[in-house]
Image (tube, rainbow, N blue to C red):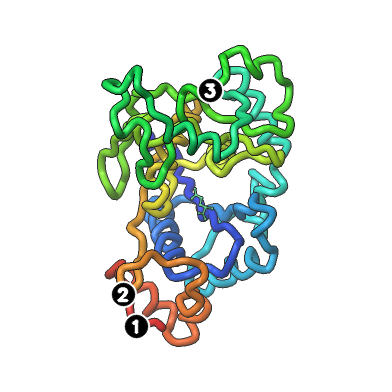
């Protein structure tokens, strides 16, 4: 980020449950960083997951964040220059970007099911056993690397004018390094095809994937720094591939450590005792903020 670029950060909750104290920590950090830079903070409602998103959770998220003392200048409730701030209302823009990405020739329609991919990953690759290192075809961070032999030929899908009812994947330059500097974790280095494979950019149910929608919104909303949990570091590597392909400016990234329960587990939305609203019944917003900023291992709230 160039020091003259005005700081624009964002909070991007998914309204699929009540926010827990792990979200509180990440979002408070995002708020703090925006304030430190005299910047603008946006609240974007990441409600593309139609099956799981609920309006009541989106409203609850805004209430809980405000109860914590977090303020934003643009959002579904306050409006702003880059409306709408609900992803579910941005489909036209997503389609326009699908066309742009498609025109670069880097995406292909994928008819293969998850099972086909798993089967292909398990098949022996005798002829090139020496070059297929175990990392190429084995899950890394739980990730199944999409096998190149399942890619269609480059001409397939080139004349499509819309995504239709099929999945579209990004044809990655396997073997290429993706490097970025994280504001918290420092230099990060990933290799396409080793750490992550051809990923979904468009889903056959007619909507963009998480990776694609987020990049489009962050470009369109002029986000200069993305603050989010460290569980999305690998997503950042994928998303950088999209930025590069679109020749769009890449924001800065700052990934926060995840809050863990006292027994070391990652928090989930089902940990109802650790939702912001439950915890704020027991302690003040100030105490919660102080505790979250001091440690990422949380005990004693439940
Ligand atoms: N909405 C996403 C989530 O709640 C986060 C998106 C992002 O920060 O890129 O996991």
At label 1, counting other C-alpha atoms closer than 10 Å, the crowd grade (few under 14, some 14-19, many 20 or more) is: few
At label 3, counting other C-alpha atoms closer than 10 Å, the crowd grade (few under 14, some 14-19, many 20 or more) is: some
Gap in angstroms between the C-alphas marked 2 and 3: 44 Å
> Disc 1 designates what residue?
300
Q: Are marks 2 and 1 in contact (CB under 8 Å)?
A: yes
State the mark number for residue 151. 3
Examine the rendered structure and indicate whether residue 104 appears above or below residue 136: above
Q: Earlier in the sequence, mark 2 or mark 3?
A: 3
Q: Is residue 107 left or right of residue 291?
A: right
At x 39%, y 59%, the residue is 29
State the mark number for residue 262. 2
- Residue 21 position, x and y percent, is 43, 70
Examine the rendered structure and indicate whether residue 73 appears above or below residue 203: below
Foreground residue, 191 or 298? Answer: 191
| Residue 218 visible in the picture | no
**Nearer the camera: disc 2 or disc 3:** 3
């Amino acid at each position: 980020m160039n020091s003259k670029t005005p700081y624009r950060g964002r909070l991007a909750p998914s309204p699929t449950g009540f926010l827990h104290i792990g979200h509180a920590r990440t979002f408070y950090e995002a708020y703090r960083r925006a304030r430190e830079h005299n910047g603008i903070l946006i609240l974007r409602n990441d409600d593309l997951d139609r099956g799981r998103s609920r309006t009541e959770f989106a409203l609850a998220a805004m209430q809980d964040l405000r109860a914590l003392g977090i303020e934003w200048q643009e959002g579904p409730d306050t409006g702003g220059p880059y409306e709408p701030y609900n992803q579910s209302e941005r489909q036209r823009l997503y389609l326009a970007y699908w066309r742009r990405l498609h025109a670069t020739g880097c995406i292909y329609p994928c008819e293969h099911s998850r099972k086909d991919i798993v089967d292909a990953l398990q098949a022996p690759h005798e002829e090139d056993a020496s070059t297929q290192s175990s990392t190429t075809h084995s899950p890394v961070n739980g990730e199944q690397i999409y096998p190149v032999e399942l890619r269609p030929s480059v001409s397939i899908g080139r004349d499509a004018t819309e995504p239709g009812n099929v999945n579209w994947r990004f044809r990655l330059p396997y073997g290429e390094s993706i490097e970025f500097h994280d504001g918290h974790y420092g230099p990060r280095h990933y290799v396409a095809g080793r750490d992550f494979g051809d990923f979904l950019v468009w889903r056959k149910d007619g909507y963009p994937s998480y990776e694609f929608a987020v990049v489009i919104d962050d470009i369109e909303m002029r986000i200069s720094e993305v603050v989010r949990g460290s569980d999305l570091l690998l997503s950042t590597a994928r998303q950088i591939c999209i930025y590069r392909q679109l020749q769009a400016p890449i924001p800065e990234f700052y990934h926060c450590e995840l809050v863990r329960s006292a027994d070391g587990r990652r928090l989930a939305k089902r940990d109802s005792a650790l939702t912001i609203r439950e915890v704020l019944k027991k302690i003040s917003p100030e105490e919660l903020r102080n505790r979250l900023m001091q440690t990422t291992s949380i005990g004693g709230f439940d």
